[in-house]
Amino acid sequence: MKRLPLVIAILLITTVIGAGVGPLLGDTDSVGQADPVDFEPSYATQVTETTEADRGVINVLAIPTGDIERSELRRQYADLGPASEFDTGVTTDRLATRAIERQLESTSADAERESQLDAELSTVEAEVDGLETRERTATRAFSRGEIAPREFLIELATIHLKATVLRDRTAMLESRASTFDDERFSNSRFQRIEYDLQMLEGPLRAHAVAVLRAERPANRIMIETSDSGIALTAIDDGQYIREVTRKELRKNGTGELTPERAEELTQQQYPTLWNRSTSWSSAGPGSLFVMSVNFEQGGFQTFIDGPSERTFIEHQQLPLDTVITGSETTKIQDGLNVTVEQTYAGGPFRLTVTDESTGEPVEATVTVGQDGQESQTVGTTDAEGALWALSPRGTFTITIFGEGNSAAFIDITPPAPETVTTAE
């Protein structure tokens, strides 16, 4: 395994007198901008920034900034309409799988059963192609602004559920075909279907399903797309969830990976996360390898292309208390001592608020604003005065409303993911 790069610390300290208030962003659950007269501090504002370079914040696969066509961070809510359609679709597909299984069981002639198995596999392959087309079409429509973030998430969630049911059907067909020595039922055919379907699933899509079904509370979900790439992030129940798909990184060719090479590539590309691992597994036909790495209360999964040896899909589920932050900004204003620890755009940032005089944690309401719009409420600090939230792309303003009329404002410009650390 490669050794982690040497940490280089760059300390930048800037003191600003009478810092201004930045623009704010809107959403349905919002807190209006405070009146500057009500919250004008009677002393100079102090801002301190500390940047630590190459700290191995979180190794990530990212869409390059120049390729991003649309970036949205919105709160998503339960919606009984799509949720009902999810349940109807899943039930219908499962009943169809069971009907196919009964039909195979009732067919006594081997030749007829083989023909039926081949036909059903061909149908699954056609459905996989259809799902891949739906994903590409939806991605381009979102990138062009033709559909809203909510519509895009519903489409991705629908594709995820359909792929999950088709994987179950494929497993049933593989079990039925195992008694036949026929090249139509080769391991490579079943593997190709299996991994094509896995590439249409993801932990963030599953989370979107849970939110729309009201199984999880409303949540802020960040969506970024390029012409063919998708990056989705969220924070839920103490975990940072990240799902990135960049199928354009795959190459045509005959190159194949061995389990040892897949392990080596994963160690090189994800040294920080690999060093936390408690177990790992790998599987794939050679032209594609899926590495699954587990650690306490989390894990990550990568899809590595054989010909290019590049990671083109990444799934991460990281406990927030294990996230390593990079740059840190501290501001003292109106009796509040506020510290923001960053990772990167689309990643989690940690905010802590304490009383300037006593050092005690402060229970505060926190909003995030951007581009001159009304601010989004992102949460309330906990008993330790801390709160984790997602960082938008581009400069944004965090507003902290403390006890009484106290308030502080702090401007943050997160680095692009690829400038912090990359899994490519």
Image: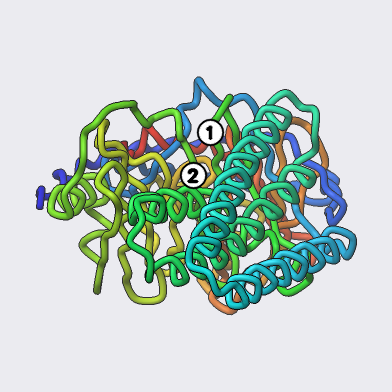
Label 1 or label 2, whichever comes before in sequence order: 1
Q: Residues within 10 Å of mark 1 (few under 14, many from 20)?
A: many
Farthest top residue? 66
Q: Cβ–Cβ below 8 Å for labels 1 and 2?
A: yes
Q: Circle 2 sits on which residue?
A: 244
Task: Name the residue located 28 percent from the left edge and 48 percent from the top edge.
Answer: 56
Task: Name the residue located 76 percent from the left edge and 50 percent from the top edge.
Answer: 376
Asked whether the viewer can see residue 240, the reply is no
Helix, strand or loop at label 2? It is strand
Task: From the viewer's side, name the closer residue of 254 and 423.
Answer: 254
Alpha carbons under labels 1 and 2: distance apart = 8 Å
- Horizontal side of 41 relative to 282 (left or right) equals right
Q: Quadrant of the C terminus?
A: top left
Residue 394, given in percent of the width and then of the height, sits at 58, 32
Q: Quadrant of residue 273?
A: bottom left
Q: Circle 1 sits on which residue?
A: 229
* Kind of residue at disc 1: Gly
